[in-house]
Structure formats: C-alpha cells, structure tokens
Amino acid sequence: MFAEDHSRRVCVAAAIAAVHVVGVYAAFGFAPRLQQAVAQVPLTVTFVTQHEPAPERPLPQVAVVTPQPLVQMPDLPLIDIPNDAPSARAITVPVQTAPPPAAQAEDRSTPKVVSTVEYVREPSPRYPPQSRRLREQGVVVLRVIIDERGAASSIEIETSSGHARLDDAARDAVLRAAFRPYVEDGEPRRALVLIPIEFALNRGSA
C-alpha cells in the first residue's frame, strides 16, 4: 500500500517537471521572434500642447457725464394786449348763417293716414241670415285705402268680429260705398283710414 502511494507521487512529480521543462524551452525558443515582431511595428508619438489661459483684463472705468443744454432759450417779454372797445370807424361784417336745409319732400305715393273721410255713398252692411239665426254680432274694423278717385282700392281686416260671415259682410258693404277723395294742397291724394262696421241684433240691421 505504501509502495503504491510512493510510486504515484513519483509519477506526478515527474509530469510536473516535464511540463516546466517544455515551458522553459518554448519561452526561450519564441522570445527572439516576439522581439523581432514588436521591433517591426512603428510607434507614433503625438505631443499635445496645452495653452495657458489668457489673463483677465480689468474693465476700464467710465466716467458718467451729465448732458448740458447747448443753447439757453432767452426769456420772452410779456406783451400787454389792450382790451379797448372797437373804434367807431371799424367796419362790422355780420356773420351769415347757413340757411336751414330744405325739408325733404314727402312721398305722395304713400297713403296719407287720416282719421275721418267723407262719404258720397255710405256703407250699407247686410246682416247675413245665418248669422242672424245664430245670434252672431260684433264690430269689424277695416283698414281701407281710398284712391284719388274716391274708390276703396284696398280693404283689409284690422280687427275681426270673431265671425267670418260678419267680416265678409262688412268688407262687401265698404266695397259698395263711395268716398270723397282726400285733397291736400289742392290735389287729391291716396288716404288710409280705419272704418268700423258694427253688427247688432237689437239695431235691426238690413
């Protein structure tokens, strides 16, 4: 048992020694070649110059100068303006005022609004029989335009009586009537007037 351990140790020591011998041989054999290869590589050296910082210069002192006026304005003398009354020999020119603008001419094509008109033949409303049987009554206010000849050229209902039959009867009555033309400044002119027509059963309308 002891002989086997001893022989094993001897083998390991021999192997270690052989490895060292081979390494030393290789080192001495390749060393010249490594030196030759390194010698063939050119070396470049660059020197960097470091600039010294420029010294700081103190700012120059600036004197503050207050501007002075070059020319001094002279004192103007006071002028006393006499406030005397105008001389008797002075000529007075009256101020002419502009004449007032002429009044704009009224458009005579627009009907003149009047409150009353004169009849040549007054309206004669006829009470509709159906309205009489149904006891319908009321007041119709018509908006009538009377032309230069005295005829009703336009009739519109301003206020209804509440019954269509009475409204139509009032319109027919005004349409059959005849008016005296409205005259202004000696000339006939169209006029606009409101005409009320009343329908009442107790008055016995036609």
Image (cartoon, grey):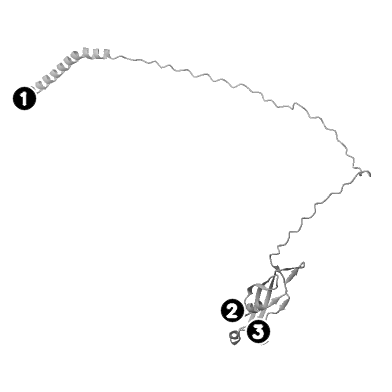
**The disc labelled 3 sits on which kind of residue?**
Ala
Q: Going 9% across and 21% down the picture, which residue do you hit?
A: 11
Residue sitting nearer the eye, 204 or 55: 204
Per the image, the residue denoted by label 2 is 164
- The answer to whether the residue labelled 1 contacts the one labelled 2, judged by CB atoms less than 8 Å apart, is no
- Check disc 1: other Cα within 10 Å, few if <14, some if 14-19, many if 20+: few
**Label 1 vs 2, first from the N-terminus:** 1
**Label 3 vs 1, first from the N-terminus:** 1
**The disc labelled 1 sits on which kind of residue?**
Glu
Residue sitting nearer the eye, 85 or 33: 85
Q: Going 72% across and 77% down the picture, which residue do you hit?
A: 119
**Label 3 vs 2, first from the N-terminus:** 2
**The disc labelled 2 sits on which kind of residue?**
Ala
- The answer to whether the residue labelled 3 contacts the one labelled 2, judged by CB atoms less than 8 Å apart, is no
How far is disc 3 from disc 2 in space, using C-alphas?
15 Å
How far is disc 3 from disc 1 in space, using C-alphas?
160 Å
Residue sitting nearer the eye, 182 or 160: 182
Viewer-side label of 1, 2: 2
- The answer to whether the residue labelled 3 contacts the one labelled 1, judged by CB atoms less than 8 Å apart, is no
As drawn, is 95 to the left or to the right of 35?
A: right
Per the image, the residue denoted by label 1 is 4
Local SS, label 1 = helix
As drawn, is 79 to the left or to the right of 184?
A: right
Residue 143, percent from left and from top: 66, 73
Residue sitting nearer the eye, 178 or 73: 178
Residue 111, percent from left and from top: 69, 67
Q: Tell me which corner region of the image, top left, top right, bottom left or bottom right, holds residue 166.
A: bottom right
Judged from this view, the residue extending furthest toward the front is 149
Residue 200: mark in rendering: 3
Q: Going 12% across and 20% down the picture, which residue do you hit?
A: 15
Q: Is residue 91 above or below residue 180?
A: above
